[in-house]
Image: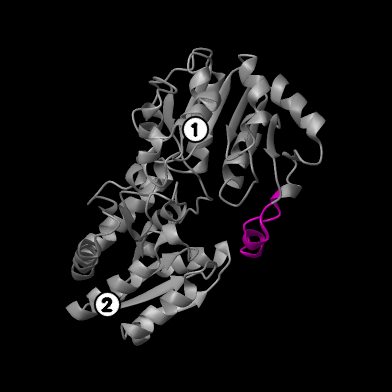
Amino acid sequence: MRIVFVSNYINHHQIPLSEELYRLTGGEYTFVQTEPMEEERVKMGWDAGAVNKPYVKLYYEDKAACDELLMSSDCVIFGGCEDESVIKPRLDAGKFTIRYSESIYKSGRWKFVSPRGLRRKYQDHVKYRKGPVYLLCAGAHVAGDFRLIHAYPGKMLKFGYFPEFVEYSDVHELRRGNDCLNILWAGRFVDFKHPERMMLMCSGLKASGVNAKVTIVGNGGKLYEDCVELARKLGLGEMVSLTGSKTPTEVREYMRRADVFVSTSDRGEGWGAVINEAMNSGCVTIGTYEMGAAPYMIEDGVNGFLYKARDIDGLCRLVERVAGDREERFKMGEKAYETVKGMWNPTVAAERLYEFICDPEHDMGRYEEGPLSKA
């Protein structure tokens, strides 16, 4: 079974899934990278030497060989690439193809009414609605977006991004006994991640007398200096620590030591792999309904919490609840870890995807929850 995955570039969030597919296919798996990675992400450690993997081919260096693979392979998974001409010949030929997409209306579904946008969506998606083309939804809002344009009827499946799963021999080693609640946020300082909301949350916690230490990891983005200044104006002092940029490995270590992980993203966060990583690390993970990963992975009040992105007061109440009940914190963190160990990890995702591809009928009802269940 020859499988090809096409995306703009491979990174540390995609390598684990690719490694599993390479194993399952006996080496008949190829990741086609269509463009070089941006320098900013390379500096952040996102490339992880991925272009040297045996299954990676660079479209911009060997277009002819890649085009041949795209037409001759049993299945092509196409996602994260702006150049639709790469996949159009295969779609026009009616060959089995899987699209892989985040939300197409990240700034709001009001854009649905744009005639120009609808023409583009028709050419890229709706035109092939009756063909052997399926959709992997990388986020909780993707299926709703595509239903608006009547694409992929009955052919949409839950999926996501699957960073490395770190297994602990004893999940209890992730229990933190700190008297001071250790809260973590990690990401680039860009608009849709709203790091400034962490400063507002800290101000609320301080006013309520919550004993907490908040670590903010990252600095790539235009909002970093604004957040530093906001922390000063709010008098947050030693409560908040801004560490600057860290490698993916270092971020994981911060997560391992944290009690709570908070995300503040709006719908611009198509997925948000920090949710996978924080839950893997046994953190009580608090994510927004608006981001892609959180509603898929977090069962509200069981293995984490969900809140509306702009509701800072609601966020503060959730953190106060976690701070006041250590046993609930421990249990919720363990359940978060088990969610990733048992379902939302690259091995399970790859095996389910491979089974779906190999099934001549492409059964949509094989799984009731998790990756490859109906979206």
Q: Position of residue 162 (x, y in %)?
A: 50, 45
Answer above or below: position of 120 versus 272.
Answer: above
- Looking at the rendered structure, the kind of residue marked 1 is Arg
Helix, strand or loop at mark 1 = helix
Horizontal side of 24 relative to 150 (left or right) equals: right
Answer above or below: position of 8 versus 42.
Answer: above
Answer above or below: position of 201 versus 150.
Answer: below
Q: Earlier in the sequence, mark 1 or mark 2?
A: 1
Q: Which residues are magenta?
A: 37-50
Q: Position of residue 138 (x, y in %)?
A: 46, 39
The circle on residue 116 is 1
Horizontal side of 190 relative to 21 (left or right) equals: left
Helix, strand or loop at mark 2 = helix
Q: Position of residue 105 (x, y in %)?
A: 42, 41
- Looking at the rendered structure, the kind of residue marked 2 is Ser
Q: Is residue 74 visible?
A: no
| Nearer to me, 170 or 14 | 14
Which image quarter holds the C terminus?
A: top left
Q: Is residue 197 magenta?
A: no
Which residue is rendered at x = 34% and y = 84% of the image? 233
The circle on residue 203 is 2
Q: Is residue 40 magenta?
A: yes
Answer with the quarter of the image where residue 115 lies: top left
Which residue is rendered at x = 72% and y = 20% of the image? 72
User: Disc 1 versus disc 2: distance between alpha carbons?
Assistant: 44 Å
